[in-house]
Image: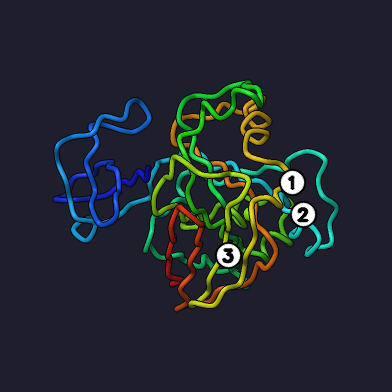
């Protein structure tokens, strides 16, 4: 099931996307999934980020292939950092360069939290997950190298494109994650290459940070990261979820 959030007639709603049709939901998908007898065409709405995270918890170096690419050892524990709620944008929105020399895309599988999760075990972790989405961990690479803290390198406005939907069913161990820059494939990996899989990440993070409904865990990028320039179109494509398209301004 694909959950979308959108604006229609100046109102924001959640709905279930089925092909080109959306069925409206009553309220949010985090408390209940109550379908209404109201339908919209996908072409009539403007899709928004499918959730409103209070924070994005992102994971660094979580693919064997990417650790190899940057010549670093695979971490013994998940390496995490924050991206703030103010960095989140939706499908088709513009990524704005805040003045860095090198602005990179990073294709990532995003995990959307369903309900408050604190100190959960690996075994129960998946009960706290609503579904999965495409995430672009936009990074000011030169600032990341210059600064000892990554707040501006990873957390500047527009640095967290999310969408286009939340897919509630996914074969997590076998999903293709790709990045396309101006239509050319730049990144491609299967989630089977993940160092720390999703249940482990949810459990690990929740030992010290309370995850709230709508929060996103960005699970890390594979090999093939690279720069974007003004006028570029960047697409993060994940098998069985969809394509998250943004433009660089
Ligand atoms: Mg990343």
Which percent across, then down, holds residue 220? 65, 51
Q: Choose mark 1 or mark 3, whichever is in front.
A: 1
What label does residue 195 carry, if any? 1
Residue at image mark 2: 64
Separation of residues labelled 1 and 3 (CA atoms): 20 Å
Is residue 75 found left or right of 231 in the rendered image? right
Return the residue nearer the eye: 31 or 154: 31
- Of mark 1 and mark 3, the one earlier in the sequence is 3
Give the residue drawn at x 14%, y 37%. 37
Disc 3 designates what residue?
Answer: 105
Q: Dot 3 lies on which element?
A: strand
Q: Say which quadrant the C terminus sits in.
A: bottom left
25 left or right, relative to 73: left
Q: Residue at left 69%, top 59%?
A: 144
Question: Marks 2 and 3, Cα distance to the nearest angstrom?
Answer: 18 Å
SS label for mark 1: loop
Q: Secondary structure at mark 2?
A: helix
- Percent x, y for residue 208? 66, 26
Residue at image coords 51%, 68%: 97
Q: Earlier in the sequence, mark 2 or mark 3?
A: 2
| Disc 1 to disc 2: CB gap under 8 Å | yes
Classify 10 Å Cα crowding around label 2: few (below 14), some (14-19), many (20 and above). Answer: some
């Amino acid at each position: 099931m694909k959950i979308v959030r959108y604006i229609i007639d100046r109102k924001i709603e959640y709905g279930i996307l089925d092909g080109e049709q959306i069925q409206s939901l009553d309220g949010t998908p985090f408390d209940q999934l109550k379908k209404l007898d109201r339908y919209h065409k996908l072409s009539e709405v403007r899709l928004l980020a499918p959730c409103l995270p209070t924070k994005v918890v992102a994971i660094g170096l979580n693919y064997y292939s990417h650790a190899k690419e940057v010549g670093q050892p695979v971490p013994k524990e998940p390496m995490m950092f924050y991206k703030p709620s103010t960095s989140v944008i939706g499908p088709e929105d513009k990524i704005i360069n805040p003045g860095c020399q090198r602005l990179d895309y990073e294709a990532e599988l995003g995990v959307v939290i369903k309900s408050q999760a604190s100190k959960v075990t690996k075994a129960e972790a998946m009960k706290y997950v609503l579904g999965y989405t495409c995430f672009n961990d936009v990074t000011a690479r030169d600032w990341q190298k210059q600064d000892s803290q990554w707040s501006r390198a990873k957390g500047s406005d527009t640095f967290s494109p999310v969408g286009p939907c939340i897919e509630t069913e996914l074969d997590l161990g076998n999903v293709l994650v790709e990045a396309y820059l101006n239509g050319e494939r730049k990144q491609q990996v299967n989630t089977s290459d993940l160092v720390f899989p999703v249940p482990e990440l949810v459990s690990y993070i929740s030992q010290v940070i309370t995850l709230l409904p709508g929060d996103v865990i960005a699970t890390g990028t594979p090999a093939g990261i690279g720069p974007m320039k003004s006028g570029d179109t960047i697409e993060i494509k994940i098998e069985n979820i969809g394509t998250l398209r943004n433009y660089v301004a």
